[in-house]
Amino acid sequence: MQYAEIKDSIVVSIMLNHTSGRVPVPDSVVCGMIQQADGTFTNPVPTQSQLMDRVRFERNQLLQQSDWMAVSDRVMTQAQIDYRQALRDLPATADPQLDENGNLTNVTWPTYE
């Protein structure tokens, strides 16, 4: 059993022992969660800025994985150039949302064949 301090319906701290002002919460509760009116806890909905940061992070991983295409001792094909440019353009062409499983949607990830 763990105990949480909750301010304005937001879990601000967790402790393993009971102290004044803390309430018992399930072990799955972490700081930042929101306590609903029915007593359950949910994660906050991410902002559009946070979603764009996630798109950039995933885009940067794909760019890093394709860096081999752009080494100085090889010539990139037009398909490789287009792929890497589409990745760099991605934040501007995305309107990310989250599905019910927390996966990014509404992002068209470029592919390279």
Image (cartoon, rainbow, N blue to C red):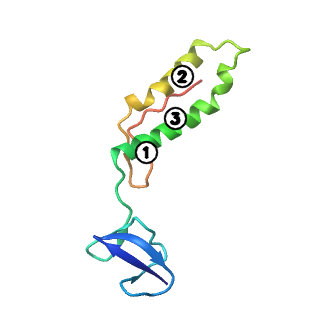
Viewer-proximal residue, 109 or 50?
50
Give residue 26's quadrant in the image. bottom left
Instruction: Name the residue located 66 percent from the left edge and 21 percent from the top edge.
Output: 69
8 left or right, relative to 86: left
Q: What residue sits right under mark 1 in the picture?
A: 104
Relative to 110, 100 lies left or right: left
Could you say where residue 30 lies in the image, as x and y percent from the top left? 45, 69
Looking at the image, tell me whether mark 3 or mark 1 is earlier in sequence order: 3
Residue that mark 3 sits on: 59
Q: Residues within 10 Å of mark 3 (few under 14, many from 20)?
A: many
Residue type indicated by callout 3: Arg
What's the distance in space between the residues labelled 3 and 1, CA to CA?
12 Å
User: Which numbered disc, 2 or 1, marks the residue that appears first in the sequence?
Assistant: 2
Give the labeled residue for mark 2.
Answer: 83
Residue that lies at the very extreme toward the right in this rendered image: 73
- Local SS, label 3: helix
Q: Secondary structure at mark 1?
A: strand
Amino acid type shown at disc 2: Tyr
